[in-house]
Image: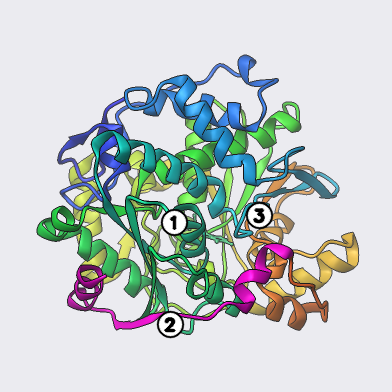
Amino acid sequence: MNYVSTRGGGAARFEDLLLGGTAPDGGLWMPASWPTLDGQPLRDADYPSLVAKVMQPYVGECFDEAELLGMAQRAYAAFPKEDPVPLVQYGDRRWLLELHHGPTMAFKDLAMQLLARMVERALERQSRRVAILAATSGDTGSAAIEAFGGMERVRVFVLFPKGRVSSVQRRQMTAAGYGNVHALAVRGSFDDAQALVKAAFADGALVRSQGLVSVNSINWARILPQVAYYFWACRRLEGAAPVFCVPSGNFGDAFAGCIAGRMGLAMGRVVVATNSNDILHRILSTGVGERRQAEATFSPSMDIQAASNFERALYEACGRDGETVARRMEDFACSGALELAPEERAHLAAAFGSARASESETLETIADTRARCGMLVDPHTAVGVHAAESLDPATPAVVLATAHPAKFPEAVREACGAEQETPARLRRIMEGEERALEIDAELQALKNAVESR
Ligand SMILES: *Cc1c(COP(=O)(O)O)cnc(C)c1O
C-alpha cells in the first residue's frame, strides 16, 4: 500500500509513517486506495486475528502476516481473555461496545498497545532510537506511557493541558514511574498542546535530530487498529447494520468507523457525538463551523476545537483533491472557520450524523442510564448514549464506551451520587509520587525539554 498526503504533496510507505508524524506538507497520510475485506474468513477469528486481518493490506510491505498476528496477540494479552471488547446490551436495540478493558481503562489502549509493538519492531530493524511526542486531552498520554514505558529505544514526552484533565488522568501520567517517560504540563488548552506538537513536527531539523514520532491519531498507524472493533461489533449483531454513536474529540475514532465502511463492512452511519465543544456537530449539521475557545467539561478527552482527523474526512468528501484540502485548512488556521461546499456536505452526510450533549445532559444521562439499566457509564460514554437517544428507536445502535467510569469518579459522583472503588489497575498510580515539568505553549520550551532529557 502506498500513502498520499491529504494536502497533495508527497508519498510514503507504511514504515515511514509509522515512525513519523504529519506529512512534509503539513497534511495527514492516507492510503492511496481502500482495500475491501471478504467477511467470510473473519467469522470465526478471535480478536487479535481479526485485527491482523483488517490491518494486513495496509502494512504488508512492513510486517508479514505471522509477524503482525504475533504482535497483536501480545498487544491484547493485557485485556480480558474471554472477550477483549465486550458488546453489552443496555436497552431495546441499544448496545455498548466496551473499549475500556485495557491497562489504562480508556479505548486508546486498543491501538496504543499494538502501535508500541510495531514501533519497537521497526526500531530494532533500523537500529534507531526515537522520541515520542503525544499531545493528550487526558487518555492518549497514559495509554502511550503504559505501552512505551520502559522500552529501550524510546523516550516518551506527553503534553497535557495543565488543570484540564481529571485527577486520575493526571496521576496516570505524572506518577507512572518509568525512567523514559516525561510528563509536560502545558499552560494552555489541549488545542494549544496539539498545535505545539504539530509545530514540532513542522521543524525538520528537530524531527531529524531527535527522531520525533507521533502517537496521536494524526499517525495513521494509531487509527488502524481501531477499525477492527467496528467489524467485531457487527459480527455479533449478525447483519443488523447498526448505527455507531462515537464520543468524539479529535475525530480519530469516528474516522476509524468510516474506514470500516470503506472496507466493505455493512453498517449504518457514524453519529459523531460531541460535548459542548461542538464544532464537529456544527460543521456536520450546518456545513459551517467556527472555532471557539475550548471549554473545560466533564468529558475532558473531548474538549477539542480543532479536530485533526476531520482533514481526512474532508479529503474523502472533496474527491481526494489535495489542493482544496490545503486551501481549506489554511483558511481554517487564519480565520478560525471551516465552510463546506454543498457536495462535500452531501458526501459527509452519507457517512456521518452528529449530536451534542450539554453538561447537564451528560450528567442526566449518567444518572438515567444507572436508574433504567443499572449500568454506570463514564461522562464520555454518556455523551454517546445521549446521541443514541435522538435516533429512531427501531434503528439498532452501538455506543462506543470509550472510558471506564472509575477514571472519572468526581463526575460520576456529581451525576448520581455513586461511589466507586479504585480498580486494582489504578491503585499503583494513585499512590505514586507525581512528577511533571510545567512549560509554556511555545515551541522553544518544548525543544528545551526534549533536548535536555
Ligand atoms: C480520546 C477520547 C475520546 C475522543 O476520541 P477521538 O478519537 O479523539 O475522537 C473520547 N472518549 C475518551 C474517553 C477518550 O479518551
Badge 2 residue CB within 8 Å of ligand 1: no
Q: Nearer the viewer, residue 201 or 128?
A: 128
Total numbered labels placed on residues in the image:
3
Magenta stretch secondary structure, dominant? helix
Picture residue at 55% right of the left edge, 32% below the top: 51
Q: For residue 162, which numbered disc appears in the image?
A: 2
- Graded by Cα atoms within 10 Å as few (under 14), some (14 to 19) or many (20 or more), the crowding at tag 3 reads many
> Of label 2 and label 1, which has the lower sequence position?
1
> Of label 1 and label 3, which has the lower sequence position?
3
On screen, residue 305 above or below 353: below
Q: Amino acid at mark 1?
A: Gly
Q: Are marks 2 and 1 in contact (CB under 8 Å)?
A: no
Q: Where on the picture, by quarter, is residue 205?
A: bottom left
Q: Amino acid at mark 2?
A: Lys
> Of label 3 and label 2, which has the lower sequence position?
3
Q: How is the image coloured?
A: rainbow
Residues drawn in magenta: 424-453
Q: Nearer the viewer, residue 263 or 76?
A: 76
Left-right relation of 213 to 204:
right
Q: Which residue is mark 3?
A: 100
Which quadrant of the rendered structure holds the N terminus?
top left
The answer to whether residue 197 is visible is yes
